[in-house]
Amino acid sequence: MQEIKVAIADDQSIFRQGLVNLVNSFDNVTVLYSSENGKELIEQLPAQRPDLVLLDFRMPVLNGMETTRIIREQYPEMRILILSMYDNSEFVESAIANGANGYLSKDDEPEEIAKAIYSTMEMGYYMNDRTSKMLITKMMKEGAMKPTFLSDNVQFTEMELQIIQLISEEYTTPEIAVQLIRSTRTIESLRTLIMQKIGCRNAVGIVLYALKHNLISHPTGTRMRIP
């Protein structure tokens, strides 16, 4: 894996320095610089261009959303992850709608932050299982999210397609096992195999792939409807 160069913007100096130290501890990841607001970060981009920026949602002078819009216009290939204490669909939708590749809560564990950075660089997006799949569907349909995968020609068995459909309807692994009359361990193994075939890290990646390749039918009377 090539070195991933990161820039960080957060107005809370203690959190910002802690995040710099954490991100620098990840394999093949280096923080080029950190800033206390979006304006300061944007001014540094021409001299040292990072692969990915971590932006606080709320900052003085230029906040995360305003900074995201500017970066997306000037550096369309740059990856953007939004950080916030607010972990609800309204803020996630705002982040993605403005061009962010993903959204992290400041309460997330270090392992989740590392996963977010690697996933965003590898696949062009990051969303964890907390994030509403309905929101992701909406953003993808509108073209705000354009994920990439290992292959666009993955072959699935009939059982795998059934699992993908049920995952899209937000059924849990034990519930899918009941639906398909299989053991939970079998479903877990097949779910892992599906993710390996696609090259994704969680159920959201499975849904994104299924949406991109029209693998999901319109559920009837289920928990989630795909627009």
Image: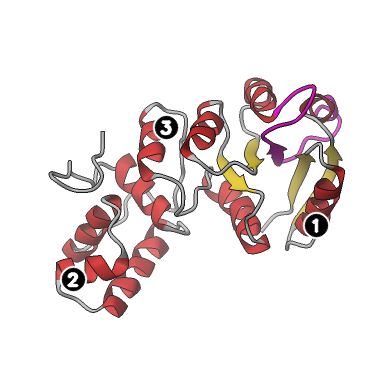
Q: CA distance from mark 1 to mark 2?
A: 44 Å
Q: CA distance from mark 1 to mark 3?
A: 31 Å
* Extent of the magenta region: 43-63
In front of the other: 163 or 219: 219
The structure residue drawn at horizontal position 80% and vertical position 49%, both measured from the top left corner, is 15
Query: Label 2, on which residue?
Result: 178
Amino acid type shown at disc 3:
Met
Q: Quadrant of residue 115?
A: bottom right
- SS for callout 2: helix
Q: Earlier in the sequence, mark 3 or mark 2?
A: 3
The structure residue drawn at horizontal position 20% and vertical position 63%, both measured from the top left corner, is 157
- SS for callout 3: helix
Query: Which coloring applies here?
Result: secondary structure
Q: What is the number of callouts on the image?
A: 3
Q: Are marks 1 and 2 in contact (CB under 8 Å)?
A: no
In front of the other: 24 or 66: 66
Query: Label 3, on which residue?
Result: 139
Q: Residue 175: x, y in percent? A: 24, 66
In the image, is residue 55 part of the stretch drawn in magenta? yes
